[in-house]
Image (cartoon, grey):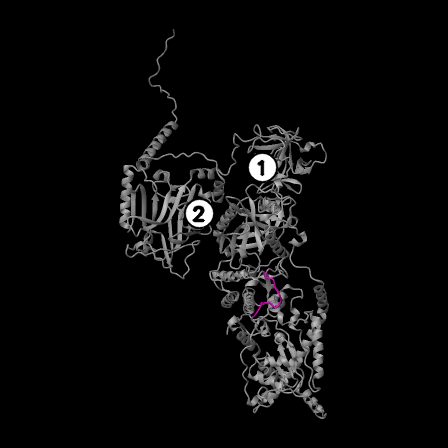
Amino acid sequence: MADESPQDEDEDIEFPAISPAPVLIALLNLVHALVIWVVAVTVHLPRYLLFSKQRRITLPEKEPTGETRRWCRENPGLRGFVLELQTPSNTFKAYKCNSTEPHPLKNDYVDGKFSFLLATDPPVNNLLEKTGRRFEMRIQGRCLTTPTDGRLFVGAELSQRPKLNIATKALVKGAMAFISRRTPGLEWSLNDDGKARCAFPCATGVDLFIATSEGQTPPDLRGELTEEDRVTRRASSLDNMPKFAADGTTYTLTLHSAAVDFTKWRVANMPIGSPSLDSLMGPQPIDVVVYDRDPADATKKRYWLRYRCRWDAALARFAERGDTATQAPRDAPPCRSGCAVVCDVAVDTGRGYAVVRDRAAAPPLKLVARDGGREPLADGDVIRVQSEDTYLTSTRQGWLAWRESKGQEPRKEEFFVLKTDGPLTLRAPFSLVSLVRPESCVGLATGAPSSRYGGRLLRLRKKCPAEDVVRLRALDFVEDSEDFEEYDDVEEDQGWRVSTIACAGFVEVVDRRAMRACRAYALVATLTSETEQKQVTRLRTADELAAVLGLTAASLNCGPGGGVPTQRRKRDAAKAQAAKAVQTATKVKDGLKHAASRRAAEFSEWRRRRSQASVVEDESDPDSPAALRAFDDEGPSDAEEPLMDEDDEEEEEEEEEEALVEEEPVEEEAPVIEEDYYADPDDSEIPDRGPPASILNEGSPWAAPVTTDRPPFHRSAGDRAAHLLRRRLDAWLETAHDNEKTRRDAWGLVGRARVLDEGFLRGGAAEVGVTSEVLRRQQDDSIAVVARSLGEGHWAEQLAVLRKGRLDVLDALGSPKKVALPLNEVLACRFVEGPFPTLVVETVGLCHYLGFADEDRRDAFATALSIARSRAAEFAPDETTRDPRDAFILKPPSYKQARLVLNARRLSFDLVEEEDELPPWARARNLLRRLAAASPDAAATAQAELFDEAASLKRIALADVGSPLEALAFFLNLYHALLLHALLVLGAPRDATTFSKQVSYDVCGDVFSLNDLAQCVLRGRLRQESEDIVPEATTATRAGRALDAVRAKLPKRSASPPKPPTPSNARSPALDDAHWALALAASDGRVALAAHSGARDFPSVIMEADPATLPATLDAACARFLDRPGCVSVDERRRVVALPAACELLVADPEPRDVVRALLRFVGKRLWHRLSALLRDEAPVAVVYRPAARRFHEALELSSV
C-alpha cells in the first residue's frame, strides 16, 4: 500500500458557503412575533376582558318574501336595519329611512312629523356626508298635553338586561358616574325591572333644540338645521332649562352621532375598534323613547314616543347577495306537453319578431312536444313554442319571429330542443336550442335594445355567453288551456266583484306589439271581496269601451283637441281673410289723414290762444319755427278738446256763406224738458243723481238655461269624450246590483289586465321607442318610464332621465320634444295618490306629475332624484335656451286655440284642502287681493302659495256660483285676477288680441280666457238678440251706413264726423262658441266699463267686487273711467261726442241722445254742462267710438268702494 503523505498543517481548509437568507427570515419571524405579542397585550386583552362573552348568532335561512325584495330594492344601503314606530294601538309599524319627505306623527301627546337619516353606501343624503355623522333623528311637532313639570326625557331602553362581566360592569358604572356629574337630570340603570335604560332631559341633552312660537314658520326638516345658543342651552341647570307646554309652540329636536353605524350594526369611530352591537347587548332591538313622569305616580313613566331600531340578519344576507332566483322546490309539479305556462320573462311580439320585455304579467306560452300528447317534458325533448295562433320560428338570418303555421305540417324551423336539469317542473329554469342548428342556442342579440321593436331581440347564437342565454322559468299554469280562452275569460273571479269604475282621463301610451302610439282611457276600478278591497288602473281603448257600453267609437275618440269649425265659421273666416288687405290699407290712409288734420287744428287753436295773450314777446311769433317747437313741447290745453277735422279759416268762410241763407223755421213739438236739468252752466250746479241703479238678483244667475253637468267644450276632444264616458259609466253601473250580465261585463272590462296594462310604464328607453343608444343601454334607477301629466286628465307615456344638474323627460317613439327641468329650481318632491303611484316634482310655477308602474319604481327613482338634487350645485347652471315664462304656465298641446293656463300648478286631485270654505266670489276676491300685492321678486315659497291658491279655483263648479249678484261679483273678480296674474307672469303683451284669447283659467269645469270672460260671460247679455257677431269688414260697412244716416240729419254748415273705427265686438268669439250660453243675467251696461281690459284707454285702477256693494262699485268704476281728461271728447259745433270703444255697450239702445243721457250720470261737472248743452235743442247728436288702445298698463292698482 502506498504511503500517504500527511497534509500540511498550514494549508487553508475550505468551508461550504452559507446564504444570509435564513438569517434574515429568522429575524423577521422574531420581530413579527414580538409585534403580535405587543398587540395582543395592548389591544386584544382589554377587548377580551370587556367583551369576553361574545356569542355567534345563527338564524335559519328563510326564503325572501315580496316585502323583503321590495325593501332591498328600495334602499340596499340600509342592509338589515329596520326602523319601527309604536302606534297608538301598541303595534310597531316600519318606516323608510332617508325618505324625501318627513313622515307624519300623531298620537294623544304630540302632533308633528319626523325623519330618520342614515349614512349609507352608496350615499343617499348629502347632509350627513358633510358632517361625518352616521345617523340623525329629527322630530318636529306640537305638544297636545303639557308634560309633568314641563320636562320631557329622551333616551334608549333595552328590553333585556345585557350580560356583562365584572370588568365591564365596573367600567360602565365608572363612566356613567362621571357623565352623571356633568349632565343634570341624567337617569340610567342596568337593571330597571329587568331592563337597561339611559335617559336625559330633552331640553339639555338633545343635539339641537328650536322652539317656534305659534304663528311663525318652523324650520324645514329637509334642509340643514342650525341653533344659535346651543352651548348655553346644554349648560343650563334643571331649573333654567327650557320647558315644554301645549301652547301651540312647535319644537324641533335632533339626535345624531358618529359613534354608531346602524347600517352595519356596529360601533364606529371608537378607539376600541368596531365591535358588533350584538356583542355588547345581545340580539335585541334598541328602543329610543321620549317620556315624562306620570302625574299620578312620579315613579312611573308616561311614554310619548317609542322608536324601535332592530337588525334583521336574514334581510342583511339577502341584501348582500342580491335578488337571485330561487331554486325550484323538490315537490314542484311537472310541466306537461300542451299545457300553457306563464314564464318569468315576457317573450313578446315586437312587429312580428320575438323580443324580451318587462311586463306586469307575461303572456302564456304553450310548450308542445313534437309527437303531441300530454306527457311530462324532460331534458332533450323536441318542442314547439306557441303563443296564441303563432309559433316561435327561426329565420334564415338567425332571428326569432312569431309566425302563423300556414300548413298542417310544421316547419323544421319551428322545432327547438329543450335544455333543463332532468324533468321540467314548475319554477325550474330551461333554455332552447335550435333543432336545425344544434350548435346555436336562443339568446339575446348583441348591442343595445332595439327602439324599433321595443326590447331585446332574440336570435340564434353559436357562442353565446352565459349571461346572454335566455333562461325561462315556468311560474304558473293556465288551467284548461286547450286554447287561450281562459286568459281573456270574462267570468268573474271567485270572491271578487267590481264595485266602482271611474274615468281618470286619457293616456297617450305606446303599444308595445306594434310600436306605435295610441290613446286609451285610464279607468280606476275598485274591486271588493268579502275580506279586502283593492284599487286597480286599467287602460281601455275607445273600441273596447264602445263594444261594452253600447256607444259608438267615434263618440269616444280622444284624438287631438279642437272641434271642426262649422260652415258659418268657415264662411266668416274666409270673408274676413279676403277683406283683411283692403281694410289694412284703408286704416293706414284714414289714420294718416286724420292725424294730419288733427295736428293742423290743434296748432291753429294754440296760435289763437297765444295771440290773445296780453304780453307777447318778439321771439314768440306764432308763425316762427320757435313757435312750432313750443307748440310741440306744450301741446293742446287740457281745458280745450282738440277739434276734429277742419281749421278755423275754412270754418269762418262756411259760416259767412251760410249766414246769407235764411232757413225757414220748422215748427215741431218740443219735448218736455226740466229746466234745472239743462240749465245754463254758469249759474247752476249738477242735480242730485240719486242712488246707484239696482241689479237683478232673482232667479238663475244665467241669462239662458244652463246645465251644471256641461262638457268641457274648450278642452281637448279627449276631455270631452272622458266627460261623456264618466256619465255613461255611472248610469251603467247603477244596474250592476240586479243585472248579472252587467256584472259579468264589468269584470270583463276591468277585472283582468290586458296587453296595454301589462306593458304600460315598464321597461326602459327601448320599450318606448327612444332612439338614443346611450339611454337604451342604461339600466339604473336614474332612468324610468313614466306617465307625465300634460293637463287635467291627460297623461303621456314618456322617459324620465336624470342627467347632470337637470331632469329630462323625453317624448316616446323618437320625438325630439322634451322637458328639461334644472334641479336647482326644484323646491320639493313628494308622493301623492293619483291614477298611478305618482311622484310630484315641485317648482315655483308648476308641479310636474310623474306616474310609475308601482311604488317600488317610484321610490327608487325618488331616491335617485334626491341624490341628484344634493349634487346639483356641483354642475354648472343649465345653458339650455328656454323661455323662463314657461315655468309658470301650462301649454296643453291639444286645447282649443292654444290656451295658456295660468292656474295649473296643481292638478285637481292634488289640491290643498281648505279649512274655511268661502263662497266663490270671496275666494276670487282674496286671490285678486294677493295678486295685486304680489311681486316678481317675492320668495319662492310665497309665489308657490299664491299659484296654489289660483289652482284651488278648480274646485268651484257652475252650481256653486250662487245668486245672480254673487255670480256677477265672482266673474268680475275672476276676470281681474286672471288679468293681474297674466301681467305678473307674462308681462305687458305686444299683441292684445292674441293675449286676450290665450291666457286662461281652468275653472267651473272648463277653460275661460280673458276674451271669453269679457265678451261672453260678463257682456254676453248686453248684446242684442238680433245682433250678429260678424267679421270685421261687414261690421265696418254697417257702421258706415249708420253714419250716412246721421250725416243726412246734420245741418249743412257742420262738417261730417270722421269715419269711426271698427267696433270692439269684431274680436268677439264665434257664434257657435259654447261660452255664450254662460252669459250672466245680472249684467248691465256698467259692466262694460267695470271689466278692465288692461289697455291704456282704461284707468290704471281696477275695482274689486262685493255683492253687498256691487251697484255702488259699478257706478264708481264708470265714473272713474269716464271722468278722465281726454276720455270723452265733445265737439259742440259739430255736435259730435267721441267715446272709447268700451262704451258701445253702456246703453242697450244705441240712440245717440240716450247714450249722452247715460253719460250724464257718471261724468264730472265740466263735462256734464257740455253734454247737457247738446240736449237743449232738437238738433241731432252723433256719437262715434275711438279704436281700443293697443298698449297695456305695466301695472294696475286695486281699489274698492
| Residue 826 rendering spot, x and y as whole percentages | 50, 55
Percent from the top left, x then y, of residue 973? 54, 68
Where 549 sits versus 926, above or below? above
Look at the image and say whether residue 2 sits in the magenta stretch.
no
Residue 132 visible to the viewer: no
* Residue 81 showing in the rendered view: yes
The boundaries of the magenta stretch are: 698-708
Task: Give the side of residue 36 with respect to residue 320, left or right.
Answer: left
Q: Position of residue 487 (x, y in %)?
A: 61, 40
Of the two numbered discs 2 and 1 on the same chain, state the one appearing first in sequence.
2
Residue 564 vs 14, above or below: the answer is below
Q: Which mark is residue 97?
A: 2
Callout 2: few (<14), some (14-19), or many (20+) C-alpha neighbours within 10 Å? some
Identified by mark 2, the residue type is Cys
**Camera-side residue of 500 and 1195:** 500
Callout 1: SS: strand
> 83 or 827, which lies in front?
83
Asked whether residue 705 is drawn in magenta, I would say: yes
Q: How crowded is the residue under tag 1: few (<14 C-alpha within 10 Å), some, or many (20+)?
A: many
Give 749 or 421, whichever is nearer the viewer.
749
Looking at this view, name the residue that lies furthest to the front: 738
Q: Classify 546 as above or below 1068.
A: above
Q: Quadrant of residue 1051?
A: bottom right
Q: Which residue is mark 1?
A: 343
Residue 432 drawn above or below residue 557: above
SS for callout 2? loop
